[in-house]
Image: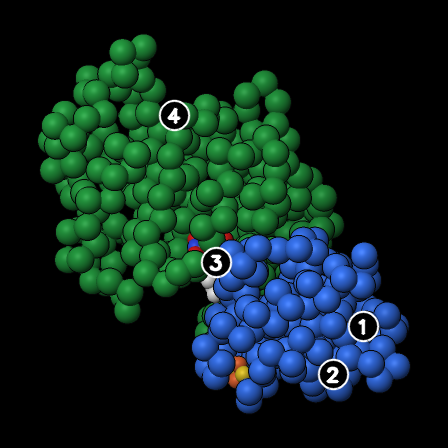
Chain colours: A green, B blue
Amino acid sequence: MTLALQTFSTVKDANAALQAAGTRYLGGGTLVVRAANEGDISVSSLVRVTETSLQAIAVSGGEARLGASVTMAAIARHPELAALAPAARAVGGPAIRNMATVGGNLFAPAPYGDFTVALLALDAIIVTEDSEVPIQTFLAGRDASRAIVTGITFVLPRAESFRFLKVSRVKPKGVSVLSIATHLQRAADGTVTSARIALGCMADRPMRARATEKALLGCKLTAEEIAPALAAAGEGTSPITDPVASAWYRNEVLPVHLGRLLLA
Amino acid sequence: MAKVPVQFTLNGAEKAEFVDSGTTLLHALRDKIGDTSPKGGCHQGTCGACSVIIDGELRLSCLTLAETCNGAEIRTTSGLAEAGVLHPLQRAFLDAFATQCGFCTPGMIMAAKVLLDHTPNPSREEVVEALSSNICRCTGYEPIIQAVLRAARANSQNAA
Ligand SMILES: Cc1cc2nc3c(=O)[nH]c(=O)nc-3n(C[C@H](O)[C@H](O)[C@H](O)COP(=O)(O)OP(=O)(O)OC[C@H]3O[C@@H](n4cnc5c(N)ncnc54)[C@H](O)[C@@H]3O)c2cc1C
Ligand code: FES
Ligand code: FES
């Protein structure tokens, strides 16, 4: 393995260094160092930044800002981020969570990216040195993205409006069969007035279940009323096939798990 | 390739080495410094055999670059015994038959140690969760879970 690490004190300098061919940003390293260990020679140089703002968590006025280097473990134990703790705890085991960053999770290919599924349902904003883009736009263009993500901002959900589920076969830890995050606003009588639903493993990266979102509007969360929304869950999906599950299986079980989550 | 200096404390002792840039901590510990207690199982983050404690947190040394550990306090299983007396976790692993081939043992003990450092009287579920990134191909896990619970009981009896 020939891998050189360059350390910078500012994002600006690191962004400049990242323009060189074969150079990648080092977050927690759980994917990028793993790839190097596995013999991936497309990366010859890693860049990291020691700026402490990247590690910061700020919550105020109902909004949260996570520095890109914040780890899953830091999110899971933060008292004001309790709504997101289940999604943070869904990533890997304890050692992985101490290393895995939220910035790296945005780039993780399926079956990974469980935390990003939660961020997608929250319609988070992805911040770089000179841009702020909605997460969906960011995910669509992430393969070509060369800029360091510095932070992620989102409006904190009220606990009762946000739900997260990761389905895996190995207990207590395992890779996702799929993951689902739902963010629903409901009227006093329980009718759904707005819905954002994000899915993991149902494409090569987290995606929104647009048809289901639309079909849920005006429904109460009963088995009868959500049935059309569940029937639409597979629209636009192209799940991965991996040793954990086939694309066919993922499509089959998605409505079942989504139904359980909505009715829970 | 350029050598870079790394400096950290390992089990309380100052260590300084020159390593190739991009060297993993696992490689630096085993092949440079000579602490072979962390094991290289998968080099993929999957087996936990390389687990060490860095600044109080469980980490995988196979996915950690040595250069990022400058100034850190690193602990490994080889530093647990004091003056020839095994650490209560090591004692419990032997007494509960929680080690067979022993390859997973140093990683298991590191994972168990961070658990007990923060949660001296864990529930069975907490033990299972704490060990969930560590794979054992020999014991079937139950003796390891029992060993950690036994070490926790021994600690609380000593403290009482
Ligand atoms: C054993 C194991 C189990 C895992 N289990 C799960 C799981 O259950 N769920 C899950 O979601 N993931 C899982 N993962 C994958 C991974 O650990 C997480 O997705 C993690 O969040 C990745 O973050 P990282 O900081 O380690 O990324 P890195 O490896 O540091 O980086 C990954 C990629 O993102 C880029 N990148 C990272 N940060 C930035 C940034 N700030 N700006 C621009 N580019 C950046 C890097 O250049 C690289 O290309 C697992 C990994 C392992 C090894
Ligand atoms: S060698 Fe590091 S997790 Fe297997
Ligand atoms: S004792 Fe052999 S792998 Fe655990």
Local secondary structure at mark 1: strand
State which quadrant residue B94 falls in.
Answer: bottom right
Of all chains, the one bearing label 4 is: A
Residue located beneath label 2 in the image: B35
- Disc tally is 4
Q: Which of A85 and B65 is in front in this view?
A: A85
Work out whether mark 2 precedes mark 1 in sequence or the reverse, and give the earlier one: 1
Mark 1: C-beta under 8 Å from nearest atom of ligand 2: no
Q: Is residue A114 left or right of residue B115?
A: left
Of all chains, the one bearing label 1 is: B
Foreground disc of the pair 1, 4: 4
Residue located beneath label 4 in the image: A161
Q: Distance between the residues labelled 2 and 4?
A: 50 Å
Residue located beneath label 3 in the image: A92
**Marks 2 and 1 share the same chain:** yes
Local secondary structure at mark 2: loop
Whether A75 is drawn above or below B22: the answer is above
Q: Which of A45 and B12 is in front in this view?
A: B12
State which quadrant residue B159 falls in.
Answer: bottom right
Residue A231 rendering spot, x and y as whole percentages: 11, 38
Of all chains, the one bearing label 2 is: B
Q: Distance between the residues labelled 4 and 3?
A: 25 Å
Mark 3: C-beta under 8 Å from nearest atom of ligand 1: yes
